Image: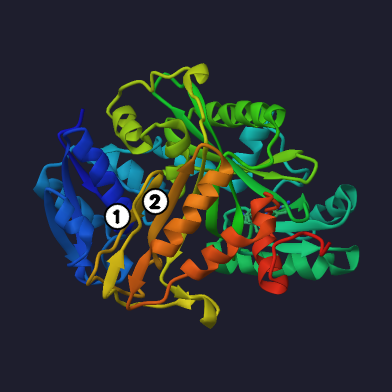
Amino acid sequence: MFNKVLVANRGEIACRVIRACDALGIGTVAVYSDADKEAPHVAMAGEAYHIGPAPAQQSYLNQDRLFEVAREAKVDAVHPGYGFLSENFIFAERCQAEGYAFVGPWHQSIRTMGDKAHARMIVGEAGVPLIPGSEASRDVHDGIGEMAGGLGYPVIVKAAAGGGGIGMHVINGPEQLEASLNKAHREAKAAFGDPLIYLEKYIPEPRHVEFQVFADKTGAAVHLFERECSIQRRYQKVVEESPSPTLSAATRERMGADAVKAAEAVCYVNAGTVEFLMDVDESYYFLEMNTRIQVEHPVTEMVTGLDLVQMQLKVAAGELVGLTQEQVISRGAAIECRIYAEDPDQNFFPSPGKITAFEPPTGEGVRVDAGVITGYEVSYYYDPMIAKLITWGVDRPQAIARMRDALDAFVVEGITTNIGLHRRIMADPAFVDGETDTYYLPRLFANGTGRRSAL
Ligand code: MV4
């Protein structure tokens, strides 16, 4: 096992990784920018190094500075968390080249799964259902347009290097085809420096269901069940839960097996997430694979009783997962509400400022993963998520009831947060009925309920 780990991140995930290292008796090295001098992860770590000014490019993304700290602190592993450098295969490769274990997948897997078109091809060849679509192309006039007719409208055009919805355009008919393809090319080139785009059959109002997978150096992968992440705003997840409230056991079985197939197709190692889009009839399709620990990993931890970050560290140190699929059991229901420093009355614009009181809720089945404390100054340099509130119940109604009570008890003063939005969602009959798909929030904002059709 490692002696000392550099936690190359900040906020709640840095605190989370430090807690996992402490539990395993591993030394921890935190890094912090000018804006994070008072951040809780600094005090939690065994050692802490200042790495530069607040802007991420000059601190948390400054690879040279991070490797200086790794050398000076004599760490033997680097945990990238999520965001920042966690899916940067150059960084992963450089960790290996400089003699540090990278707590994550092999850099080649990061590279493979980072190219959405390439990932689709490999996973499709392994027999995982893909959304019917075209091969990627750089040139509008090489037949990709004819594909649209073959797929049947509506279709959607996506950037191969993309993600998070950038450069995506729904095309409802042939009259929009040419203009939309040209626009997608331009946006793909501008956003990712690569005009590679591809077409897919458009799935209206899909659910976003993802499976946690874990693999060790033997290449054997297991899934740790699913997370329903359909409640999103501008492709940013807001509420996640496990199990998915409406997924049938038969579909769960098949999706889990396909998630494992996708991971094994790319010789995946460590923690990964296979994302699917699911249609109303529970037909599902591979969307993408995330090669990092995700924000929403706690809901999986609450229903399986596993510590995913400790597992990451053990597997990165060469240990085996040591679990057969039959030994992975999901019990009860867990829900996560992401607490953002943003103002719902200002179109959820970030709302930085000094937190004058931060008193998270406690109680049976309540977990708070926070990246802030009373007195901390939330800046606008980083993602505005300040904490995650997770509840577990013996069933979904109990998890919801506990979430309502926890949200009511959550004290955050000095800044505005989206806690009010979460209380609205937890009180919404459509949410309670599990009627959530990726258009739930737009419907809630428009109609006061996320109900699909105004009954
Ligand atoms: C789709 C889709 C419908 N049909 N692809 C959005 C982000 C990117 N990762 C993929 N996304 C989508 N791709 C087809 N063929 C709908 C979405 C989508 C979405 C997907 C997952 C979670 C939230 C979403 C919100 C809007 C659209």
Q: Amino acid at mark 2?
A: Tyr
Disc 1 to disc 2, C-alpha distance: 8 Å
Classify residue 49 as left or right of residue 162: left
Per the image, the residue denoted by label 1 is: 9
**Which quadrant of the view contains residue 97?**
top left
The outermost residue toward the bottom is 346
Asked whether disc 1 touches disc 2, contact meaning CB atoms under 8 Å apart, the reply is yes
Determine the image quadrant of residue 271. Answer: top left
Q: Residue at x 76, y 62 (%)?
A: 170
**Crowd tier of the residue under label 2, counting other residues whose Cα lies within 10 Å: few below 14, some 14–19, many 20 or above:** some
* Residue 128 is at least partly visible in this image: yes
Q: Amino acid at mark 1?
A: Asn
Residue 113 drawn at (x, y percent): 53, 42
* Label 1 CB less than 8 angstroms from ligand 1: no
User: On screen, 68 above or below 423?
Assistant: above
Question: In the image, is 250 to the left or to the right of 116?
Answer: right
| Residue in the image at 83% along x and 64% along y | 177
- Crowding near pointer 1: few (<14 within 10 Å), some, many (20+)? many
Ligand 1, image quadrant it occupies: bottom right
Q: Position of residue 313 (x, y in %)?
A: 29, 34
Q: Is disc 1 placed on a helix, strand or loop?
A: loop
Q: Where is mark 2, residue-wise? A: 82
